[in-house]
Amino acid sequence: MAEYARAMLTGKKPRAKPPRERAMTALLYELSSIATNLSQLADATGMTTYEDWAKYVGGQLVEAVSGRTDLTPVIDANLEKINAAGHWVNALARRANMGKELDLQEVHDALVAVQKVLKPIHDAVSQPPPETGSPPDGSDAV
């Protein structure tokens, strides 16, 4: 936002971020939000499963996607679903933070939803990134 404001004030035309960068920024925001809310659920319920998931989503998965420029298609295809699952977890964490009783089945269902929507990202980062710089015909000749 600050970069945009500076550009407008100095009369420069703001440049849009490349799609790859926009997708990664959005995914990292969603993962961070989900991890924070899962940690809050762990605190509210005392269930370590949610803390383990928070560590995976906000730590291991974030680390695995960082620097993976090949993930834009899978991120774009799944970001809306990840966002929806994140909203569900956020609503539950908000209730927990207000001291309201949680339906543990609903909390479990939300965790299953998070697991389901993150599976394509998990699967993508489990594969090595495609090699770049190879000739289009697949040969090793330089």
Image: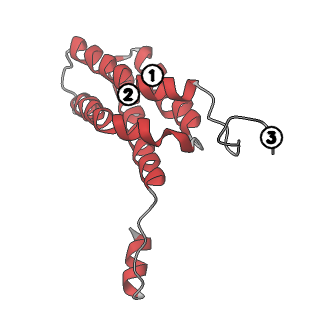
Q: Residue 23, which numbered label?
A: none
- Type of residue at label 1? Trp
Q: CA distance from mark 1 to mark 3?
A: 45 Å
Residue, disc 1 = 53
Q: Residue at x 19, y 15 (%)?
A: 103
Q: CA distance from mark 1 to mark 2?
A: 7 Å
Residue, disc 3 = 141
Q: Quadrant of the C terminus?
A: top right
Q: Nearer the viewer, mark 1 or mark 3?
A: 3
Q: Say which quarter of the image contains residue 128.
A: top right
Q: CA distance from mark 2 to mark 3?
A: 49 Å
Left or right of 102, for residue 24: right
Q: Earlier in the sequence, mark 1 or mark 3?
A: 1
The reply to whether the C-beta atoms of the residues labelled 1 and 2 are less than 8 Å apart is yes
- x and y percentages locating residue 64 in the rendered image: 58, 33
Q: Residue 38, which numbered label?
A: 2
- Type of residue at label 3? Ala
Q: Earlier in the sequence, mark 1 or mark 2?
A: 2
- x and y percentages locating residue 92 in the rendered image: 24, 28
The reply to whether the C-beta atoms of the residues labelled 1 and 3 are less than 8 Å apart is no
Q: Earlier in the sequence, mark 2 or mark 3?
A: 2
Left or right of 127, for residue 83: left
Q: How is the image coloured?
A: secondary structure
- x and y percentages locating residue 94 in the rendered image: 24, 34
* Badge 1 element: helix
Question: In the displayed image of the protein, which residue is found farthest to the right?
Answer: 142
Q: Nearer the viewer, mark 2 or mark 3?
A: 3
* Badge 2 element: helix
- Type of residue at label 2? Leu
Within 10 Å of disc 1 (Cα), the crowding (few <14, some 14-19, many 20+) is: many
Q: Say which quarter of the image contains residue 28.
A: top left
